[in-house]
Image (cartoon, rainbow, N blue to C red):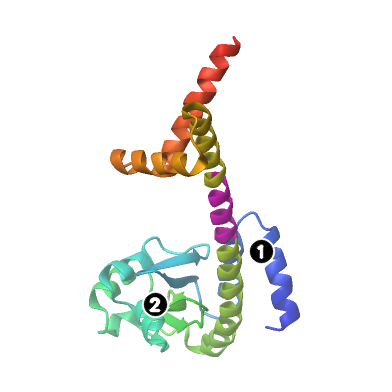
Amino acid sequence: MTSEMSDTLEQAMVRSSGLDTLLRDLTDRAVDAVPGAAACSITVRRGDRLLTLAGSDGMPNGLDQRQYENGSGPCVDAAETGVEQYSPDLAAETRWPTYTEYARSAGVRCVLALPLAVEGEAGAAINFYGLRPGALGTGREQATVFAARAADAVNVALRVERRRESATDVRTALLSRSVIDQAVGILMARERIDARLAMERLRRVSQDRNVKLRDLCDQLVARATEISSRGRQ
């Protein structure tokens, strides 16, 4: 993906009402681009667990989740080892017996899982599912090409997500600071003490009551506001 295309994609994601919709569209396009693919999903490790960021229309329920629960399956292995996992016929597959049984019961007969190079994450994969034995055989090359493009898109999506999370953290911190400052001001006026002593008292009460400082200050400000409102009635 060129830098210009990546910038355009990032701008589209920023404008989007949700990254889920765009990633869902990506998996739908993957099904159209890869011969024999009936469904597609994107797996990413976040923290200490694997999760599915998006799945195409027609994706059998629980197909990826069953792998995560068992810690075994093509998308788990592809994400964790960085090695392509291909099973042309699950009826003859012996690597993931529990998963294979479940996948076949869902109508899946072949699987192709390709690792994705995702920034800042421990592992990722794009997973293709076919309904006939060997259905994905002729589409492996197209799947590999699409996986490279998908990695760029997923990287952009996660980058935008991190920016939004960071902005949320900043807003939360600013709101917390504002409430704490208000509570300090209330104590200063009520007890005729300076800001340092007022802050010390708030921290001490927070620890004694095992209540977060932000929550304690919220309560104090709310009570002061209520009393002030009564006084004006």
| Quarter location, residue 84 | bottom left
Using the rendered image of the protein, determine whether residue 116 is visible from the camera's viewpoint. Answer: yes
Q: Which of marks 1 and 2 is nearer the N terminus?
A: 1
Please identify, in this view, whether the residue under mark 1 or under mark 2 is nearer the observer.
Answer: 1
**Residue 75: which disc?**
2
Which of the image's four quarters has the C terminus? top right
Camera-side residue: 89 or 217? 217
Q: Secondary structure beneath disc 1?
A: helix
Which residue carries the number 1 mark?
A: 13
**Quick check: 177 above or below 75?**
above
**Residue drawn at 58 percent across, 51 percent down:** 171
The residue range painted magenta reads 164-175
- Which is more toward the observer, 152 or 182? 182
Is residue 28 visible from the viewing direction of this image?
no
Residue 171 is one of the magenta-drawn residues: yes
Q: Magenta stretch mostly in which secondary structure?
A: helix
Q: How far apart are marks 1 and 2 (CA)?
A: 26 Å
Element type at mark 2: helix
Q: Position of residue 76 (x, y in %)?
A: 36, 77
Q: In this view, does 206 lie to the left or right of 11?
A: left
Q: Which amino acid does label 1 sit on?
A: Met
Name which residue type carries label 2: Cys
Name the residue located 71 percent from the left edge and 64 percent from the top edge. 12
Question: Looking at the picture, how far across and down is residue 164, in whole percent?
Answer: 59, 59
Quadrant location, the N terminus: bottom right
Asked if the stretch drawn in magenta spans residue 169, the answer is yes
Q: Where is residue 160 in the image (x, y as percent from the top left)?
A: 61, 66
Picture coordinates of residue 94, whole percent (x, y)? 25, 84
